[in-house]
Amino acid sequence: WELRKAPEVVKCATALQDLRNILKPCRDTGRGYKDPALDNWTKGQLESMVTFLTHYTNPSSPGYEAWMAASLLTANRKGMSSWWAHDLREATKAYINNRINLPINPYGTWTIS
């Protein structure tokens, strides 16, 4: 049961801030943001995780403190399936438990054609 339990909202809020910092790292000068140097697939996955965690941690969201509802809400808004929401929950939970567990692009390196 412990493995299936939703993470605490406080842990998720911390992970949400960490993800935002990965997607928009601050410049050394403090003004603006650096390029995160992420490929499009990884960036898209991290943005989906941010959306999911925002729904889960925002008291005004219908997905507040409802792990599955927040993931399904994210999937629905992105036009994805409930299986995609399942994968999103797994990837997000892995990241919350260990910050080095970032999604890895299954397609390898991308080239421009």
Image (cartoon, rainbow, N blue to C red):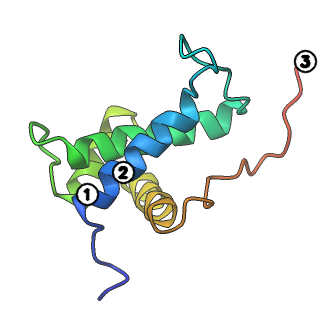
- What mark, if any, has residue 100 been given in the picture? none
Residue type, label 2: Thr
- Does 82 appear above or below 47? below
Sequence-wise, the earlier of marks 1 and 3 is 1
- Residue 79: image quadrant is top left
Q: Nearer the viewer, residue 51 or 84?
A: 51
1 and 3 marks in contact (CB < 8 Å): no
- Does 57 appear above or below 101? above
Disc 2 designates what residue? 14
Disc 3 designates what residue? 113
Secondary structure at badge 2 equals: helix
Could you tell me which residue is drawn at 65 percent across and 20 percent down? 34
Around disc 2, counting alpha carbons within 10 Å, would you say few (fewer than 14), some (14 to 19), or many (20 or more)? few
Counting from the top left corner in percent of width and height, residue 58 is at: 18, 41
Gap in Å between the C-alphas at discs 2 and 1?
Answer: 6 Å
Furthest-top residue in this view:
31
Counting from the top left corner in percent of width and height, residue 86 is at: 41, 61
Residue type, label 1: Val
Between tags 2 and 3, which lies in front? 2
2 and 1 marks in contact (CB < 8 Å): yes
Residue type, label 3: Ser
Gap in Å between the C-alphas at discs 2 and 3?
Answer: 39 Å
Could you tell me which residue is drawn at 28 percent across and 77 percent down? 5
The N terminus sits in image quarter: bottom left
Q: Is residue 104 visible?
A: yes
User: Horizontally, is 13 left or right of 92 in the view?
Assistant: left
User: Horizontally, is 25 left or right of 75 in the view?
Assistant: right
The C terminus sits in image quarter: top right
Secondary structure at badge 3 equals: loop
Around disc 1, counting alpha carbons within 10 Å, would you say few (fewer than 14), some (14 to 19), or many (20 or more)? few
Furthest-front residue in this view:
29
Disc 1 designates what residue? 10
